Amino acid sequence: MPLSASKVIVPIDFSAASPAAIEAALDLVDHPSQLHLIHVMLPLETVSPGVLLGDITDERRTQKVTEALRRLAQENQAGEAHLEVSIGTPGLEITDYARRHDADMIVIPSHGYHGVKRLFLGSVAERVLRHSPCRVLVLRRNDADSPAG
C-alpha cells in the first residue's frame, strides 16, 4: 500500500531532523497546504527568574517560536503549511492536535536514544505512537546513537 495522505502533522523540535521530517511529509501530500507543522513548548516554571520578573511570557515565547517555525517552513518548501505552537506535554499535545484536525498521518523523527539517555529524556515518538488517532511514520535519524553507544 503506497503511503499518501491528505492531512499530515509534522512535529517540529528544531533539531537537525526537522527539515528531513518536512521533506518526508511533502512526499506524502499533493500540496504543502496539506501539512500541519506543530511545535510544543513545555510550560514555564513559575519560579524561574524570567517569569517572576515578567520578562518571559507564554505570549512572547509563542510569537518567537511561530516566527522560527514560519522561517523553517519557508526554507523547506512548506511555506503554505499550517503552523501551530502550543504549550503542554509534547506527545499528548501532538496527538490531541491530530485528533482535532482529523489527520491522516503524523510524520515524526526519532532521536534514537537508548538506555539511560532515553530513560531521562523520554520518547515523544513513542508517546505519539501509543496515543495517535492515525497512522504514524517514525523517521530514524542517520546520525542517531547506536545501541552499543
Image (cartoon, rainbow, N blue to C red):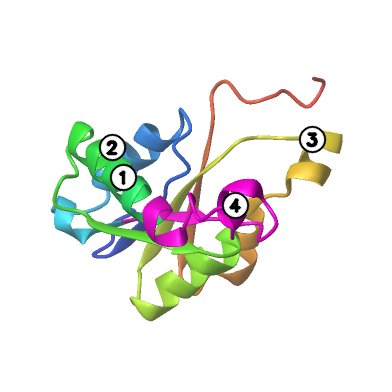
Per the image, label 4 sits on a secondary structure element best described as helix
* Residue displayed at 73% across by 49% down: 122
Q: Alpha carbon of mark 2 to alpha carbon of mark 1: how far?
A: 5 Å
State which tag comes first along the sequence, 4 or 1.
1
Q: Residue 103's spot in the image, x, y percent? A: 35, 70
- Relative to 100, 30 lies left or right: left
Q: Alpha carbon of mark 3 to alpha carbon of mark 2: how far?
A: 27 Å
* Residue displayed at 57% across by 20% down: 143
Q: Alpha carbon of mark 3 to alpha carbon of mark 1: how far?
A: 27 Å
Q: Amino acid at mark 3?
A: Lys
Q: Residue furthest right?
A: 116
Of discs 4 and 3, which sits in the foreground? 3
The residue nearer to you, when weighing 112 against 92, is 92
Please give the residue where the numbered disc 2 appears in the rendered image.
72
Please give the residue where the numbered disc 4 appears in the rendered image.
125
Please give the residue where the numbered disc 3 appears in the rendered image.
117
Q: Alpha carbon of mark 4 to alpha carbon of mark 3: how far?
A: 15 Å
Q: Which residues are magenta?
A: 37-61
Is any atom of residue 10 visible in this view?
Answer: no
* Residue displayed at 14% across by 52% down: 80
- Quadrant for the C terminus, please: top right
Is any atom of residue 124 visible in this view?
Answer: yes
| Label 2: few (<14), some (14–19) or many (≥20) C-alpha neighbours in 10 Å | some
Q: Amino acid at mark 4?
A: Ala
State which tag comes first along the sequence, 3 or 2.
2
Please give the residue where the numbered disc 1 appears in the rendered image.
69
State which tag comes first along the sequence, 2 or 4.
2
Per the image, label 1 sits on a secondary structure element best described as helix
Labelled disc at residue 27? none
